[in-house]
Image (spheres, rainbow, N blue to C red):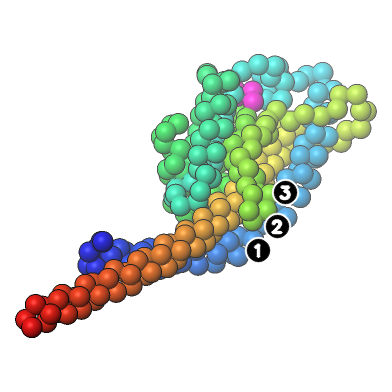
Amino acid sequence: MENLRIIKNRLRTIDTIIKATNAMKMVSTVKLARINNKNKFSNTCSNILSNMLKKVLKEAIFLKDCDPNAWFMRKSGEALIIVLATDQGFCGSFAQNIINLANDAIRKNPNAYIETFGKKADSIKLHRNIINKFNIKDFAKSIADLVFDYILNKEVYEVFVISEEFKNVLVQKAKYSQIFPIEFDNESDEYTKIEGNIYNTLNDLLYEYLLKFFTGCITEHLFSELSARVMAMDNSVKNARNMLDELNVLYNRVRQAKITQELAEIVSSIECAR
């Protein structure tokens, strides 16, 4: 039989775990509700800007004096892979799914530039620090600035983003998205006539497109992370409570056994004294 003191210590430890996991679940739930109410139209804005960018690109391609070194004329170059990971654990297989997909992408593009965000991505490459990742506007701007600089100054030809896709509260899936170059239908004659410097217009549209895309991408990624953490904490609380019930039963059995043993010793000593 186990010692009663040991069982008591285990009961106190599990009770502390339940309180801690419940607190983490509540915090994640509150953040989840806040993120759900933010940036609902980011994906719509990103799609609109993407369509505008495609139409302006068509006019640029039709111009005879296009600069062959411009980003929309490149035919080759290095790839850039952006990895959105997480700073914290306690969210099931969320972080590991991102890492596995990122490692697969790196094996396919060994010469690619790699930029990671989140401490859990340190196994791939040292991550860039984000002061407050839940300030989605600033977070998106920092990544958009980085990608825009890569495209203009390092002549990146392809840009891929690895993040988490939200399916439902129970299911989140790591996804691998290509956001650059901008693809459009060459066979269509529809394009937009732009007055002024078309290169400046293209650069402005590209930056705004990146900004809106990453705003929506980060929102979905954080929403998926918090959903995974809420479910992980909920399962942890359920498992801890089951352990607590089992230990309470064990504690009562051990205590009853000790009482029975003491009674047996008292009765035995009385019988021997007669």
Q: Is residue 189 magenta?
A: no
Q: Which residue is mark 1?
A: 37
Q: Residues within 10 Å of mark 1 (few under 14, many from 20)?
A: few
The quadrant of the rendering that contains the C terminus is: bottom left
Res 180 seen here: yes
The span shown in magenta is: 154-158
| For residue 253, above or below residue 126 | below
- Distance between mark 3 and mark 1 Cα atoms: 14 Å
SS of the residue at dot 1?
Answer: loop
Q: Residue drawn at (14%, 76%), measured in percent from left and top?
A: 268
Q: Position of residue 34 (x, y in %)?
A: 59, 64
Q: Position of residue 157 (x, y in %)?
A: 64, 23
**Numbered circle sitting on residue 43:** 3
Q: Is residue 112 left or right of residue 90?
A: right
Going from N to C along the chain, the mark reached first, 3 or 1, is 1
| For residue 254, above or below residue 222 | below
Residue type, mark 3 in image? Asn
Q: Which residue is mark 2?
A: 40
Q: Residue drawn at (42%, 43%), measured in percent from left and top?
A: 119
User: Could you tell me if the residues under marks 2 and 3 are in contact, i.e. CB atoms within 8 Å?
Assistant: no
User: Could you tell me if the residues under marks 2 and 1 are in contact, i.e. CB atoms within 8 Å?
Assistant: yes
The secondary structure that most of the magenta stretch takes on is strand
Q: Position of residue 235 (x, y in %)?
A: 51, 58
